[in-house]
Amino acid sequence: MVSSALDRLTELDKRIVVALQRDGRASWRTIADRIGAPVSTVSRRGQQLLIDGVVKVAAVPSLDADGPHAQFLVRVNCRPGTHMAVAEALVRNPVVRFCTVVTGSFDIIAELVVRGPATRYPQVVLDLQPIDGVERWRSDLIMHVYKVSYDWGRQLFADMIDDSAADADGAEDCEPDHLDDIDRRILAVLKEDARMPFQRVADELDLNESSVRRRYDRMRANRCVDIVTLVQSAALGMEAETFLTVTVEPSRMEEVARALADYPFVRYLAATLDQNSLLCEVITTSVDELYRFVTDSLAHLEGVRGWTANMELLFLKRGFIETPWWRAQAHGPAV
């Protein structure tokens, strides 16, 4: 994707993007009804957004689909001039769920998912810590994830979002025996393009369309699949993506987490083991808005002791999916 694709985005394009964040597999007709635009226009513009790489929609198995797991937050310092090579090496590893280049006291922040107990972590990092360019590697156990949001853009167009459409609470978490080999083959195809029609998926796998549809609906009902809609923040006019490591009084951890999770621009929120802290990813329309949040809101939350921050410069991977734009951003367009 070249930067000119972002420069050409209209208000309608942005509304389509936000609708795709809400439901990446929604039909163009459903999206058109939601945003109040002609179906033909929404279909044409939406498909162009996907072709240009402004948006990528992927389907991945939920974390619970492969059984017990542990998540680790990794902060990496690199030898000068090597941070992009290190980040690229991390992105290629399947245990890396997200990876971003940042400012501040670290060069890279990433999340690693270890299958099985947390005690397997040393075996996993044996292949990662020796990456050429890594000078310092700091690991922290993620104890609990309070929020993961792929529809952060709705803060811009709240009028068109119906919260009643959210997934109903009460469904049981996915278990490994909920998926068989055919289910996983379906997800492998949808990982490349989650908007692929069921008939095309069926043709690729030599299955019946009705069987693919039925299996997909069951996986969604069992929370065994996550639909990940990736969009560059600049596409929606967001200027500041920041990781805040918030130090909290131990007795107020849950209280502070609930308060932070209510903010629509908080994209990710998790409790980490070290220093009674919360990792809070915030995406705002401007640095001024970020400033107002930390001074007017965060600074006054009961239980918050302080925080450190890292601004995100380039996101390479999220939800196990490589972003389609990072190479062009990092290396510039091909000549």
Image (tube, rainbow, N blue to C red):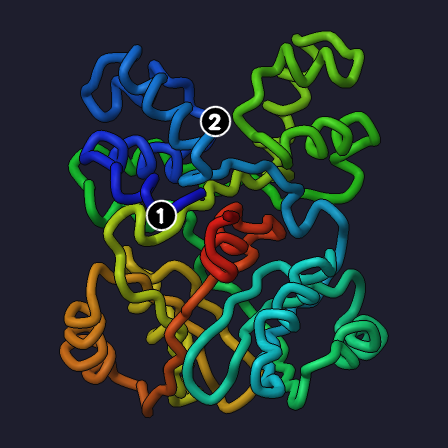
Q: Give the amino acid at mark 2.
A: Arg
Residue 215, x across and y down, in percent? 68, 22
- 151 vs 134, left or right, is left
Residue 241 seen in the current view:
yes
Secondary structure state at the residue bearing disc 2: loop
The residue labelled by disc 2 is 25
Residue 239 image-quadrant placement: bottom left
Residue 199: mark: none
Which residue is drawn at the image coordinates 49% and 52% (left, top)?
328
The residue labelled by disc 1 is 3
Residue 281 image-quadrant placement: bottom left
**Disc 1 and disc 2: Cα gap in Å?**
26 Å
Which residue is drawn at the image coordinates 26% and 43% (left, top)?
7
Upstream in sequence: badge 1 or badge 2:
1
Residue 326, x across and y down, in percent? 50, 55
Q: Give the amino acid at mark 1.
A: Ser
Residue 305, x across and y down, in percent? 33, 91
